[in-house]
Amino acid sequence: MNTLSRKQREIADRHAMLLDIGRSLLVEEGFHNVSMERIAELAEYSKGTVYQHFSCKEEILVQLCNDSMTQLLSIFEHARAYPGTHRDRMLALIYAHFLWSELNPVGMSMLQHMSMHGVKEKVSELSMERHTSLEKQIFGCVVDIVESAIHDGQLVQPEQQSVPNIVFGLWSMCFGGQILTTTHHVDLQMLGINNPQLALMRMGSVTMDGLNWMPLHNQTSFIELQTKYQEYFNSEAGQLAANRTATSH
Amino acid sequence: MNTLSRKQREIADRHAMLLDIGRSLLVEEGFHNVSMERIAELAEYSKGTVYQHFSCKEEILVQLCNDSMTQLLSIFEHARAYPGTHRDRMLALIYAHFLWSELNPVGMSMLQHMSMHGVKEKVSELSMERHTSLEKQIFGCVVDIVESAIHDGQLVQPEQQSVPNIVFGLWSMCFGGQILTTTHHVDLQMLGINNPQLALMRMGSVTMDGLNWMPLHNQTSFIELQTKYQEYFNSEAGQLAANRTATSH
DNA sequence: TCATTTTTTGACGTCGCGTCTAAACTAGGC
DNA sequence: GCCTAGTTTAGACGCGACGTCAAAAAATGA
């Protein structure tokens, strides 16, 4: 039992190490430059051993992606607990999304990869289930806030729009905006967009105004608000720093 | 001159044929299953010949992408001419975006691919310039509508939000929404989103309400509105049918 | 110490990209 | 009609990456 557990621990450790190597390779050279050979080499194991942990390259991808999403979920749950109105919480959520994508430079790009043809098919069922489950939980976290706002009378549910649809709209904006921001071929600056994150937070607020979500936007500067959020999500920002040093050691 | 021109025509024809083959392969089997060998085989030419037209696989991608974007631009320009208020036009634009992504099942996925690491680097400068130029034109088309609305007094430019930022927000929503919709691993239905396109059009309208863009949303059913747009974009819908038969012949 | 089971290794088959040389073809002069 | 110079095409080749598998190595247990 003891030896077995030791062996299991060894395997789990190696699993984590391989994921770490994969992550750092992904950060440094992008997905197309990550190869199983390379990971094996850096881990000082052979290819065969790596394949005992991951059935294919995509499996590493999805597991890294799931890790990122777990992190997102926990940031979102933190955001849900933000002290303030439901609106403030919602905005905190949008901020949290940005924070996450900065914490996790590969998270978004992995999500993008996940949506490509032929990934879902290659990946293990278990990882895929975990993935969709996380998706549901993350989505549910946002739905929670909207429903709380309705429950507390700060938002009247529009006749023509269900709660999931509202969440979908905001999700789309954050997701799309993040892709456009982190994407390397669109020059937002050139198009007149200097601070995309701030822009999207403002647009999120505008959308809530459009929903008549009380209290309507007051004159508080968004920059100030951003600073507030920054303080609130301090620990995550710290984790960011920790991650940075951990992956680049 | 005549013979030279004939040769040139032959080359141009073959270029188009290769792109067509690439497109249909992309539609049928997804990007990862498209190979230069395969294209050459289907075209009944050798690999070397294909490489005389496209320096690499990505070059085919970006040229197909540019074709799609040209199509998008023309649909957008049509939408800009929609008879009605500027708001109606804006909504028509959102509708047009959906229409395009249906006309062009690969357009979106190619845009996604474009944003991935290592594509921009491999592609010819000319194609890349064309790409960014199209992007600018498409973006400009939307900016136009917002600015017209401001000019005609139907929209007061918010203090904290520039026109490009507003456009960026709506763009993000459409783009992200489209990815989430066409993506094969997110089950929107399960999350309670039955008609994502309608949902996004409504959210677009909500956002415009939040901007105080006159006239505010009246009680017109969006389903009705959608039918109106459908009629207006009749020709594009027809082109869709034509394309379908052309690529699958 | 040896036999059995587990783990690790890296050579191998396959595929796709992109190159490059030799062969086929074309055009134009005689 | 034939020959040559230039152009176009074919496909063999080298390379690198994926994923497999049988043999080698290590661990376990008697």
Image (spheres, coloured by chain):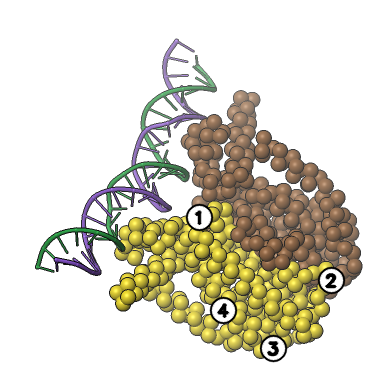
Chain colours: A brown, B yellow, C purple, D green
* Residue nearest the viewer, comparing B33 with A185: A185
Q: CA distance from mark 4 to mark 3?
A: 19 Å
Which residue position holds label 4?
B74
* Residue nearest the viewer, comparing A178 with B144: B144
Asked whether disc 1 touches disc 4, contact meaning CB atoms under 8 Å apart, the reply is: no
Quadrant in which the N terminus of chain B appears: bottom left
Camera-side mark, 1 or 4 = 1
Which sits earlier in the primary sequence, circle 2 or circle 4? 4
Residue at mark 2: chain: B
* Residue nearest the viewer, comparing B80 with A102: B80
Q: Which mark is residue B159?
A: 2
How many neighbours does mark 2 have within 10 angstroms: few (below 14), some (14-19), or many (20 or more)? few
x and y percentages locating residue A122 in the rendered image: 50, 51
Q: CA distance from mark 1 to mark 4?
A: 28 Å
Kindly give the residue lying farthest to the bottom in the view shown: B83
Which sits earlier in the primary sequence, circle 4 or circle 3? 4
x and y percentages locating residue C27 in the rendered image: 25, 69
Residue at mark 4: chain: B
Please give the name of the residue rendered at 90% of the width and 68% of the height, measured from the top-left corner. Answer: A218
Q: Which mark is residue B122?
A: 1
Which sits earlier in the primary sequence, circle 1 or circle 2? 1
Q: Is residue A90 among the parts visible in the rendering?
A: yes
